[in-house]
Image: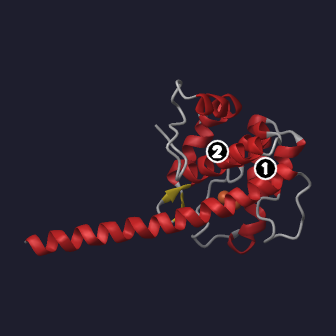
């Protein structure tokens, strides 16, 4: 069962009220093939794009709910904010424009498959703020943008810790031989 990073809540646990509330907001997207395909791409340091999207979505949901905002739109936008299908590390024609273009591509993909309300479209298109100069229009968009940076940082350090653990295991194994 999937969990968001740093969270103990199993998102598919039907006995957990917060997980059920979250799933009610996103289940059509969460179980779609378009989401599953994101698992093939590494996003940050051993975290897949699917896991990163779940992380951003879950924290956007929690924080928006706490602040009395539209948590459904925030959760849905968070889940779809990186819905693009290329490896941004590999050289390609979009590489130089990636910070701007991937958000527009994700917005286009999400709109075609799931339809978007104004908050969701704004949050997806502008989640790279302040790297792009277009200011978000809604509070929920700021939440998604902040959740994106927060999760990217945690994923980065989590990846470093995983590399350290593997190195320690390798060293211990080498000493035993
Ligand atoms: Fe992104
Ligand atoms: Fe992201």
Mark number, residue 171 = none
Q: How many marks?
A: 2
In this rendered view, identify the residue nearer to me: 174 or 19: 19
Measuring 29% from the left and 72% from the top, which residue is drawn there?
167
Image location of residue 21, percent across then percent down = 66, 30
Name which of mark 1 and mark 2 comes first in the sequence.
2
Q: Where in the image, quadrant-wise, is ligand 2 located?
A: bottom right
Q: Helix, strand, or loop for circle 1?
A: helix
Residue 140 place in picture, x, y as percent: 82, 49
Residue 59 is situated, as x and y percent measured from the top left of the image, at: 66, 49
Closest to the observer: 39 or 133? 133
What residue is disc 1 on? 107
Residue 68 lies left or right of residue 27; in this view the side is right
Quadrant (top left, top right, bottom left, bottom right) of the C terminus: bottom left
Which residue occupies 33% across, 67% down?
A: 165
Q: CA distance from mark 1 to mark 2?
A: 19 Å
Instruction: Report whether 177 appears left or right of 151.
Output: left
Q: Residue at x 72, y 51 (%)?
A: 81
The residue labelled by disc 2 is 58
Tell us which disc is closer to us: 1 or 2: 2
Q: Position of residue 34 (x, y in %)?
A: 62, 41
Residue 153 lies, with reference to residue 19, above or below; the image says: below
Residue sitting at 53 percent across and 67 percent down? Answer: 156
- Scheme of image coloration: secondary structure
């Amino acid at each position: 069962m999937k969990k968001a990073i740093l969270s103990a809540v199993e998102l598919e646990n039907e006995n957990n009220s917060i997980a059920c509330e979250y799933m009610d907001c996103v289940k059509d997207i969460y179980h779609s093939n378009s989401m599953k395909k994101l698992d093939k791409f590494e996003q940050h340091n051993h975290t897949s794009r699917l896991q990163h999207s779940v992380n951003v979505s879950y924290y956007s949901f929690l924080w928006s709910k706490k602040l009395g905002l539209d948590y459904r739109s925030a959760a849905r936008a968070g889940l779809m904010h990186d819905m693009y299908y290329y490896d941004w590390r590999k050289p390609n024609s979009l590489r130089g424009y990636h910070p701007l273009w991937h958000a527009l591509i994700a917005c286009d993909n999400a709109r075609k498959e799931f339809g978007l309300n104004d908050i969701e479209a704004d949050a997806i298109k502008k989640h790279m703020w302040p790297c792009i100069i277009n200011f978000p229009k809604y509070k929920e968009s700021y939440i998604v943008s902040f959740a994106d940076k927060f999760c990217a940082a945690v994923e980065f350090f989590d990846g470093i810790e995983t590399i350290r653990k593997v190195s320690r295991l390798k060293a211990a194994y080498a000493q035993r031989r």
